[in-house]
Image (cartoon, rainbow, N blue to C red):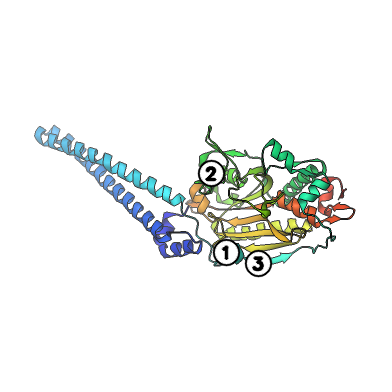
Amino acid sequence: MLTLKVITEETDRVIRGLEKKHFKDAKESIAKVIELNDKRRSAQNQLDKNLAEVNSTSKLIGSLMKEGKKEEAEVAKARVAEIKEGNKSLQAEMDQAAEDMQNLLYTIPNIPHESVPEGNGADDNVVEKMGGMETELPKDALPHWELAKKYDLIDFDLGVKITGAGFPVYKGQGARLQRALINFFLDEARDAGYLEIMPPTVVNQASGYGTGQLPDKEGQMYHCNLDDLYLIPTAEVPVTNIYRDVILDEDSLPIKNCAYTQCFRREAGSYGKDVRGLNRLHEFSKVEIVRIDKPEHSYESLKEMLAHVEGLLVKLELPYRILRLCGGDISFTAALCFDFEVYSEAQKRWLEVSSVSNFENYQANRLKCRYRDENKKTQLCHTLNGSALALPRIVAALLENNQTPEGIRIPKALIPYTGFDMIK
């Protein structure tokens, strides 16, 4: 969440940033935060004054009793009792203002980096770069859901039988391709210096609030009501929460972690042709990279993460493009975000396969993730993460773009992982 320091000292910049993200009632929300903070501080100041008076009056009572001035001592005791009684309502007022302010701060998004372009939605995102190999397919090229059926790779109907729509069953070479991609992505991350983590795929409420998935305004998380736990939408949540309430040594930064997990998203409101096959699932596999860094180095880390994800797509021989997201399309928690998309020749459309984001200190402030600098002062870290990569649409693009009359060709970099060079 935004820090009170930036809200109170850079109010105009905060409001402009929120308006760039099309956050409704930006001025009113920030004004309310400032009002609640002033109310909390006023109550705290009065409590401090009252405490000082209680301490001084209590010492006076002892002196008066020694001097035999019992009546004056009783008056002083009554004053102490009066102050303490008043402190109860002041404490309640301060606590309520703090709670209301915290709840309001949870609903206010991060402000975008100055390089985020203006825009209302996906159509206004800026193409930063295009690359990869051009693809020429046979005239009778099939979409991946038809290829999956033809080669018996993925059974969507069986997934519906077992669970429901959006939970496919991978079979045979389809399952081996899935596992090959996971291992390939993890090995590439390890070679790039990321420490592999195997986290839980269920988290508590504090973890959801820590990375900004809660409050769940759009109802996208699966909630285990009985135990008040949540299925993770991405490994970002458990991995970043490793550093909740932690003070790190400056020399340990940047911290680089990666993790493979299953991910779960309700995808409420997603319907139509764009969700066929693997295009949009409720459960899917993903390898995530996460960094914890110092503010002055975090944008260098972002560049390195972007290069890492691009390198994966180059090795997979897929046509891709990198988008700088505009203010109306960037996520709630991100300060700057780049999306990677691969082109599906059979579907004639771009498929998002990764988002790489710098959250600056927005998540760290929620998490109380800090480091101790060279002057022994604690500072908020910056957090970053990215998909490296999400599997469903990568699999879709690989199947579609590599189909030939003889079968589906496997990219050279994956052959050591699949154990076969062609799906027949």
On screen, 114 above or below 209? below
Instruction: State which tag comes first along the sequence, 1 or 2.
Output: 2
Query: Residue 127: which numbered mark, if any?
Result: 3
Left/right placement of residue 89 relative to residue 416 reads left
Helix, strand, or loop for circle 3?
Answer: strand
Specify the farthest residue to the right. Answer: 406
Q: Position of residue 116 (x, y in %)?
A: 56, 65
Cβ–Cβ under 8 Å for marks 1 and 2:
no
Amino acid type at circle 2 is Gly
State the image coordinates of residue 368 (x, y, percent, origin top left).
Answer: 49, 47
Asked whether the residues under the numbered discs 3 and 2 touch, taking CB atoms below 8 Å apart as contact, a structural biologist would say no
Label 1 SS: loop
Amino acid type, label 1: Cys
Read off the residue under disc 1.
326
Residue at x 45%, y 54% (from the top left corner): 3
For badge 3, the amino acid type reads Val
Which residue is identified by label 2? 208
Is any part of residue 153 visible from this angle?
Answer: yes
Q: CA distance from mark 1 to mark 2?
A: 25 Å
Is residue 372 visible from the viewing direction of this image? no
